[in-house]
Amino acid sequence: MLRYRAIAAMLLVLPLAACTSLTVAQPTNGQQICGTVSAVVSWSSDLQGSLLVLRDGNNVSQQFNIDSANRKATAALDMPEGSHSLNASGSFSCWYCGGSASALSASSNFTTYCKKK
């Protein structure tokens, strides 16, 4: 009986762990890029409000095209050579949070090493 309860508890908890997520899908952490950076931010539940994206601490949210139906945002970012960070944050619907939104953030650190000609 105890074994069945443990299995039932795991089956209930596992879906919650992956229920709401935010990811900087591109560029990946540690990636080295030559040229324009194709940035992709994706999420797993409905975006509530706006998505904030910072490149090296500067707001570049307006450069992103939001595709709410496919739960992703994309942008082509030109930037100088060197080390960079891309940080995304927002509020997302959360059915297991009592109807409230869940604030999430994600980041990626990457390097650009040549300019596109």
Image (cartoon, rainbow, N blue to C red):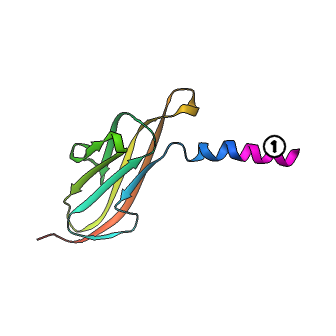
**Residue 87 on image: x %, y %:** 36, 51
**Residue 32 on image: x %, y %:** 32, 71
Q: Tag 1: Cα neighbours inside 10 Å, few (<14), some, or many (≥20)?
A: few
- Residue drawn at (45%, 40%) of the image: 45
Which quarter shows the C terminus? bottom left
- Residue drawn at (42%, 52%) of the image: 23
Q: Nearer the viewer, residue 1 or 63?
A: 1
In magenta segment, residue 100: no
Q: Quadrant of residue 98?
A: top right
Query: Could you tell whether 93 is left or right of 86 in the image?
Result: right
In the depicted structure, whether residue 12 falls above or below residue 80: above
The residue most toward the top is 99
In the depicted structure, whether residue 42 falls above or below residue 79: above
- Residue type at numbered disc 1: Arg
Disc 1 element: helix
Q: Count the numbered circles shown.
A: 1
In magenta segment, residue 4: yes
Provide the residue designation for mark 1.
5
Q: Which residues are magenta?
A: 1-10
**Residue 105 on image: x %, y %:** 43, 46
The residue most toward the left is 117
Query: Could you tell whether 10 is left or right of 70 in the image?
Result: right
Query: Could you tell whether 59 is left or right of 105 in the image?
Result: left
Q: Main secondary structure of the magenta part?
A: helix
Q: Nearer the viewer, residue 66 or 4?
A: 4
The residue most toward the right is 1
Q: Nearer the viewer, residue 57 or 42?
A: 42
- Residue drawn at (38%, 49%) of the image: 42
**Residue 109 on image: x %, y %:** 37, 62
Which quarter shows the N terminus? top right
- Residue drawn at (68%, 42%) of the image: 12
